[in-house]
Image (cartoon, rainbow, N blue to C red):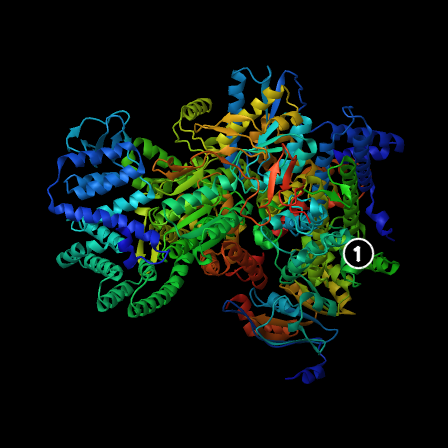
Amino acid sequence: MTPHILTRSLDRAATAFVLLVAAVGVLIPLSNLLLPQGSMFQVPTYLVALWGKYVCYAILALSIDLIWGYCGILSLGHGAFFALGGYAMGMYLMRQIGSRGVYGNPILPDFMVFLNWDKLPWYWYGFDKFWFAALMVLLVPGLLAFCFGWLAFRSRVTGVYLSIITQAMTYALLLAFFRNDFGFGGNNGLTDFKDILGFNVQAEGTRAALFLLSCLALIIAFLICRAIVSSKLGKVLIAVRDAESRTRFLGYRVESYKLFVFTLSACMAGVAGALYVPQVGIINPSEFAPANSIEAVIWVAVGGRGTLIGAALGAVVVNYAKTFFTSGPLAPYWLFMLGALFILVTLLLPKGIVGTFNSWWEPRRSTGIAADEASAAREDGISAAKMAE
Amino acid sequence: MNVMDTRATSAMLYLDGVHVSFDGFHAINNLSLTLAPGEMRAIIGPNGAGKTTMMDIITGKTKPDEGTVLFDGTVDLTRLDETRIAELGIGRKFQKPTVFESQTVQDNLLLALNVDHSVRGTLFWRGSKAESERIDKVLETIRLTDARNRLAGSLSHGQKQWLEIGMLLAQDPKVLLVDEPVAGMTDVETHLTAELLKEINRNHTIMVVEHDMTFVRELGVKVTCLHEGSVLAEGSIDQVSSNERVVEVYLGR
Amino acid sequence: MLAAFSSHSCRGPDVFANCIDRFRALFLSILLLSCLAVPALAGPFEDSVAKFANDEFSDTEAAVGEIAASGNALASPIISALQDGRLSADPDSKKVFITQTDGKIVDATTGAAVDKLPDNAAAVRLNNRLRRTVEAALGGLTLLSPDPAKRLAAAQSVFKSHEENLLPTVESALAKESVKSIKQAFAEARAAIILFKSDASDSDKLDAVAVVKARGDQEALALLTGLGDQPALVTKAAASAVSSIQSNLAMWSMVQNAWYGLSLGSVLLLAAIGLAITFGVMGVINMAHGEMVMLGAYTTFVVQEVIRTRYPALFDYSLLIAVPLAFLVAGFIGVLIERTIIRFLYGRPLETLLATWGLSLVLQQAVRTAFGPTNREVGNPSWMSGAFELGQITITYNRLWILCFTLAVFAILLAMLRYTALGLEMRAVTQNRRMAASMGIATSRVDALTFGLGSGIAGIAGVALSQIDNVSPNLGQSYIIDSFMVVVFGGVGNLWGTLVGAFTLGIANKFLEPVAGAVLGKIAILVLIILFIQKRPRGLFALKGRAVEA
Amino acid sequence: MLTQLTHGIATMTRRRALAATAGLVLGLAASSPFAPAQAADDTIKVGILHSLSGTMAISETTLKDTILFLIDEQNKKGGVLGKKLEPVVVDPASNWPLFAEKARELITKDKVAVVFGCWTSVSRKSVLPVFKELNNILFYPVQYEGEESERNVFYTGAAPNQQAIPAVDYLMKEEKVKRWVLAGTDYVYPRTTNKILEAYLKSKGVAQDDIMINYTPFGHSDWQTIVADIKKFGSAGKKTAVVSTINGDANVPFYKELGNQGIKATDIPVVAFSVGEEELAGIDTKPLLGHLAAWNYFESIKTPANEKFIKEWQAYTKNPKRVTNDPMEAHYIGFNMWVKAVEKVKSTDPDKVIDALPGIEAPNLTGGTSKMLPNHHITKPVFIGEIKGNGQFDVVWKTPGLVAGDAWSKELEGSKDLIGDWVGKKCGNYNTKTNKCGGQGS
């Protein structure tokens, strides 16, 4: 009666999105590497890095949308998982520097030499191996989310209370990582990376490959999210979002569902962070700042909460706007624009870009394909009202 | 009053000496009530009599301060949470119709089906013929076959009530707790609902909370009247409605 | 000569530096005392005064010594003027002038009035070391001053400098003194001198230890720990006095922590109280709440600027003027925000969060554009400056006033909600909007006013916070997270919960801080809040019953 | 928009869809998100990388204005090499990854010849790899923790030996301080500075018991406990001083608390390394009379060059109250050094300018001439100023001559053998023990 999980997740819009990301992932690096510099279609390296950053943000936005748009969990601390993934990758990259650091110490990163640490703290062990770091990228955010979620969901902390304590979590981590004694470089964070898996992080080829990988990760994350939201699990999540206690009285263990998506979403955010760090070249505690997490939620709102494509799109659009407005004569005014954008989107486009488009487009389509994105988006008002409870 | 004694009663639901208070307000006061297997019981009582709170206690939403609440003669419900109690086979319809408004009628029933409710189970759920037949049957019972692809949020109030009862049916519990099923319904709908409940009662134990005396009369079952958190009167509708104290409570003397 | 002295009381390298300072002052005092008997000579006094014009610290120091020793009637006014920065010198003519406290200018050597300062006259500069020299010199000069405040200051200065040769003066002052507290100060000063006097008898010294021990504060501790070599008996007594003072101070430090906690709690409460209305009562997640606080602080700044330029005499009242104005400014902007943005978002709290976040960015940048990105100066009025001692703890006036102010605001707010028509309407609308509307309450007006009230109180908080924190566009940002923590911790929708939450967090923070350090202390508090919410998912004072869940 | 497009794609033939997607993607990505750069050949572009929004705007906005002012002045004099200078302003918004992104944008897209920018160490660390990779020049104007010498960076702010150590020397000699509180914000600059100071103090015979180290979070605003602790620590019978590396925003509440708790400079003086005229503008300084700051420049220093600079600056900003401060002077020196170097090699080519810069001399505003050293730091005088009632500083002490900036601290175990020498050794971390480039070696 119901098609296979993969075919089910790939409806027309989803297929188109995957193809688009794949095309971006292949064409941008190719044009950067193969076309001559100065050609009209050549994408300069700095734009590859920039778009790589946008793609990582899109993954983060997806992870937030999965829990907020579909399960009603508004995390104002998702930046913490992103940053933890980033730190795990950053630690690997630091260890790869080896004796090329300014002090030439083969084991200790520069900031440790600098502060007279005589040996590597235990939690840095293993990060010289890529597989270990890659595992940690998933494990550390996942574990934190699991423990945090286990406590919070079991005690039925919901709504704004949950939002505020996620904020407290990321704020506490921010303060902790600022501490130099914590062993992660304090405010200066981890930086000055040399290579990744033996390739120079600054090289154009590496950048292109990282970009391609980020696009690939976005596609995979998108497919995982699609698979979830189009499965019965997705229906349960929406049920939890819209009427949590009803779901519970039907015999669903709501906390398990929340814990599952929350942990999964944290892992996705961790991967996004891990891909982000080598492309921007630095990870510092400010990634934990509550403001960053709130901004990421806003990308989702702008793109369209409860629409996966919208979340990804929102991340790209807002960050593109940010890049655009922070240069040139507009620079002093960009905060006005950004602030106004948030206000106007929530007032005039409460469903976000994609949600609004869908509700405009859908009646015009002859077939009433029930894209859950559309229906989910249509119910935004209702679900948000529910969350007030 | 140990467990062995109550087993002897073989009651489906057994409440004895239950007390609950919120900030000094005694919502439930030494409440004792027994529901036999296969029985349908109507609960009446003025506002604030503790009807909904009693359901909250049975379904694990509220923990009683003291007292015994047993299901099926053996299971102590006061120690379990909502999910576990639902899994045991106690279904509940809320006072305010609560359905998943952003999902279709069919999906609402699908979610209610008594199948694997684990995360894994739902993630890799493929559906089966048996399931879709069950859904078709329930849809027919609650007269919503034509609306199966409509969003639940777009249903009328009465239809939502039915959908919620349908969800209870799909859940196939041993006991159904039904809170004000006909509130806001037309006379015709009320009549149909009474028929529906009677039909369901053939295979299920039911506890109905209702204000509508016509409806209760139509059900024609044993009635319990609650007042200030404890049982005021019990018996047939005629007995109860002729009870002086009940009249006093309802009419406010 | 110095070496001869140092062999007595200054042994060991640690105290050597102190000794140099002391000897310098001692030297002055000896000169001073010996000169009291000798009639002043005209010539050298002018020469000494002229040294001020050299703009060299060493010359200034020499001049202070010589003038203090001169016995000239002008010595005290000159040195006082120097201390207050009222002494000017003309480097060309080498003339030195005193600007008197009433604004008149006199020639320092003659006392003759002068019309105005020469163009290139500049204030004679001091550094910290010189300031100490001046203080010591003045201390010696004012021990017998008719002004009780000056005598007290002189006694305290002598307690710190414990100049041996001042002993006779201190003793005669002690004998003459009639004010009890000053007499006590003289007794302590005398004890300090005796303790450091090498030829004092053991029994005198033991008495002195007892006097200093009775004083029991940080300075007494400083004196006793810095005694240097003493007879064994005295050392022992001093050691026991030190440990007794220390244990006494340790007890006081608990009191001190509690006070700091209350004070921090009052700041948190003040910042959160407006949020308790907009968020707690109305359910609006107002991320621009911090910016309302900031607007209040900037209102204070503007008020003070106007006062400074137009009506300097009113400066002490600036805060009193600023409080209603800040309430109006922030309240008005709050109403404006409610009417233009928030009212379209009721029932969608998370979207309100996003819109108000955007708004906070706009407000911050607007203030940055209007007032510049740097801190603005907001001064403390005199009644909010300084501190007083309560037992062994220092209580600063600004913190005390803020605590009182916070409690007053809280009480007024509570009374307003309880006894006024608006308060009644507010509660009605919060509890059951539809019912309230059908009973003829203009709910949208009440919404606007409630939001305005919350914002206005945030503005008032800004006035108080401008007294202890930066007035910069970032001001609000630093309070928003803490405010939310307080409201959530205390329980949304309950003003008393906010009160208890704020003070609990404040006190917990201040007791953790000495143990864990400021950073870890703050982290610990956050973790505690997270864990606490698990235990009580709706905060400390959760509303119960069905109303909350509806 | 995207969904509309993708729906359109679905109805197209596959080949056409692919072609359309390719065109769109490249069009979108390659059309840079910025206004098209007008590559005018008659100007030399100068990048300005200072935060204009966010938490650091409070300090950095002034530096942006300073460079605009200096460019304006230079253009009035006819520019450089006969070309006008053209400022390119970007806003990295106090966001460290954005610093790297904007640096990359300035260099690749705007093709600037030099960048003046950064305030915090982390922002410098963030852009460092970019400057190395794209081979451009950064002038960094703020006092920092040292321990760095990079080919592409010129450090015109103070190294620890040009600020912290002279200040401690002053307190030891002039104020006879025996007991030290090292209070700082918990980040790298205070940590390192305090590490250096601790080692230095111990080498001068100060016991461990006489040193108290205290760290607070960024933006700490409740100083009651710490000020009380300082008071307590200062009552041990020895002259005590506080060396403050407290950062930016936390200073105002700190000083307010000091003033209110009645800690006078004559009792426990505080010497600060991050408090200048701009910071004092936010405080009533009367209770702070006599507390100290160590800088390489004070606005109150009376020299003809400084008076001219202040006058022109206030005229340029149309604000007669606008103050000047140390990092501004650093930009002034750095800017003039860069202009001289460009004129010397008659080119803005970064390689040539980098090689030309060491040895270039430029007047500072305090009457001396600063020189760019082979380690890319400069020589500067060190002044100790006391806070006056009017928000200015009164210089009470200065080093006899100019102090050469050390890239590597002599007090730290890990770096005492290292030197930076981009002239002879062509190396930023040359080990004088092993005679090898590359730090401690292994």
Q: Position of residue B133 (x, y in %)?
A: 86, 59
Q: Position of residue A35 (x, y in %)?
A: 81, 27
State the residue position of label 1. B123
Mark 1 burial class by Cα count in 10 Å: few <14, some 14-19, many 20+: many
Numbered disc 1: secondary structure: helix
Q: Nearer the viewer, residue C523 or C115?
A: C115
Q: Nearer the viewer, residue A139 or D84?
A: D84
Q: Is residue A367 above or below residue D105?
A: below
Residue C207 vs residue D265: left or right?
left
Q: State the residue at coordinates (57%, 68%).
A: B49
Q: Position of residue B227 (x, y in %)?
A: 56, 70
Residue C180 vs residue C381: left or right?
left
Q: Is residue A24 above or below residue C385?
A: above
Q: Is residue C347 visible?
A: no
Name the image quarter holding residue D27.
Answer: top right
Q: How many marks?
A: 1
Residue A158 vs residue A96: left or right?
left
The amino acid type found where label 1 is placed reads: Leu
Residue D57 vs residue D8: left or right?
left
Q: Position of residue C250 (x, y in %)?
A: 39, 64
Q: Chain of mark 1?
A: B
Q: Quadrant of the C terminus of chain C?
A: bottom right
